[in-house]
Amino acid sequence: MIYIRLIPISTSVLAWLSLIVIWQMPWLLYWLPWFVLVWILGATRIMLVRGQNKTDWWRFAILPSAFYLGTLLYGSLLRLDRVWIMQLLFLMAAAVIYYYYRYTYFYLFRPVKYRVASIESLSLYANFFSFFFTVAGLYGIQSSLNAPLWQFILFLSLFTIAVLYQLLWANKLSVQESIVFLLVDVLVIIELAWSLAFWPVNYHIAGLTLAIMYYCLSNLTRLHLLHELDKNKIKTYLIYSAGILALLWLTAQWV
């Protein structure tokens, strides 16, 4: 049983070390991330099987996998001379992965210590950051390599489906009841992403813009499906999102 308790710390340390190593030795990018992702999948499956939940292990694995992948993509584009930013980013990824598995461990094996809605709350914010890191990274890579836009859109579509599904699932929403809303949200995000690809802004601004739109849209959908949405909450999300976007674009560095 002790090896189950070591999963949170071992997985977070492995993710952190792999990001540091890849940053210093970029040629490891071709195989080391695959090893970490396989480790995350395996560790999640072991924990869930031991916790008598054999069917949901892949759903629990979505968030740590997405956050690690997003951090990897975004970190690969940052300037090498900004060491403290890189270290902060990688430590953030390790902390999110650690606490996610810690909450999962408490949820499965120590329900007395588990705080209600811990996984849901962590998923809400980690979902946003993983989306921002991934989208900004994809914009940067697509721009740097001049890759076909359809490849960017295809990967973004699959990633958005995964993280949005994880957010709705973490809030205990039925897939059958939410599938239509999920697909509509994905289509809206893809349309916005396609449009942003032609605007002359750097990948930081494009990624953050789309992430704010995703955050607003996904939370309105979540609250609607939970029957907790009202006019005040709609106004709050729209006003704050519009205000942040306006401030962001007024101070943006145009390319």
Image (cartoon, grey):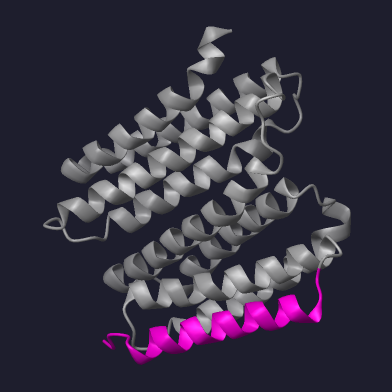
Judged from this view, the residue extending furthest toward the top is 1
Query: Does the magenta-highlighted stretch encompass residue 234?
Result: yes
Residue 163 point in image, percent of width and height = 61, 54
Left or right of residue 162, residue 204 in this image: left
Residue 75 lies left or right of residue 192; in this view the side is left
Say whether residue 210 is left or right of residue 225. Answer: left
Residue 244: x and y in percent read: 48, 81
Magenta-highlighted stretch: main secondary structure? helix
The image shows residue 117 at horizontal and vertical percentages of 70, 44
Residue 189 location (% of width, % of height)? 60, 74
- Give the vertical position of 144 relative to 62 (above or below): below
| Quarter that holds the N terminus | top right
Q: How many marks?
A: 0
Q: Quadrant of residue 222?
A: bottom right
Residue 239 counted in the magenta span: yes
Range of magenta residues = 229-255
Q: Identify which residue is drawn at 54% across, 24% down.
A: 43
Instruction: Give the residue drawn at x 48%, y 55%.
Output: 130
Taking the spot 31% from the left edge, 78% from the top edge, the residue there is 202
